[in-house]
Amino acid sequence: AQSVTQPDIHITVSEGASLELRCNYSYGATPYLFWYVQSPGQGLQLLLKYFSGDTLVQGIKGFEAEFKRSQSSFNLRKPSVHWSDAAEYFCAVAEGGSNYKLTFGKGTLLTVNP
Amino acid sequence: KAGVTQTPRYLIKTRGQQVTLSCSPISGHRSVSWYQQTPGQGLQFLFEYFSETQRNKGNFPGRFSGRQFSNSRSEMNVSTLELGDSALYLCASSLGPGAEQFFGPGTRLTVL
């Protein structure tokens, strides 16, 4: 069965600093990979996704992620964090085709210090 | 275009009762998925509907059920509520199976 591990439960960074959130997945075939963000009391917003092709994907709000098959990783990065980026971030993997469903990691809570 | 709407946003029930949650997908979307979010278990897939048919189901007891109507709106029902059913229930819609999912704001269910 597919699974997702986000090793960091909580990360604190200073505003303007760079950010990297880690995500490792377990899945037999080529996965569909996603990063979502959730602000308090809100639903999930898709930041970016990887289906195939270029392993470096660009998303909204200045985020990017790199798919590394050899490391089974899909880490999320941002060069300069803004206070409004404080939220919880979820990595997810999905099977493709007719058996499509999302399996989420436990999330990483990001705190941004002024 | 309006997003995914979920009603009600907040709900308080007592153990043993049943509850029905509603989800209206984005116009034109025919697939609806439901997820349960709790602090302990995180986000877990409940089920997916497409064209009024359940296509996929997560590992939840039979107390959890759902359905989809011809206009793609979906409801999920939880019977004989338990304290552990307290959670944020999220609905997501997409054009079809395998397409990008758009999430609603969720329904916060509290079971006392």
Image (cartoon, coloured by chain):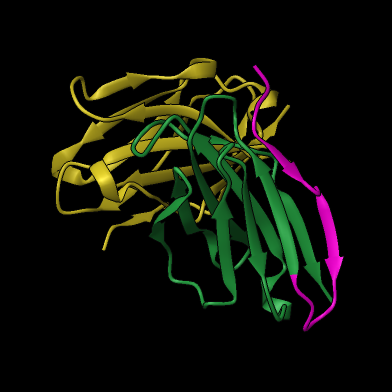
Q: Main secondary structure of the magenta part?
A: loop
Q: Colour of chain A?
A: yellow
Q: Is residue B104 left or right of residue B58?
A: right
Q: Nearer the viewer, residue A73 or B8?
A: B8
Q: Residue at x 55, y 60 (%)?
A: B42
In magenta, the rendered stretch is: B1-18
> Which residue is depicted at the point 66% across and 44% down?
B23
- Residue A43, by quadrant, is top right
Q: Which chain is green?
A: B
Q: Quadrant of residue B12?
A: bottom right
Asked if residue B64 is among those painted magenta in the image, a careful observer would answer: no
Residue B58 position, x and y percent, is: 43, 64
Q: For residue B7: magenta?
A: yes
Say which quadrant the C terminus of chain A sits in: top right
Q: Is residue B57 above or below residue A55?
A: below
Is there any visible trace of residue A95 in the rendered image?
A: no
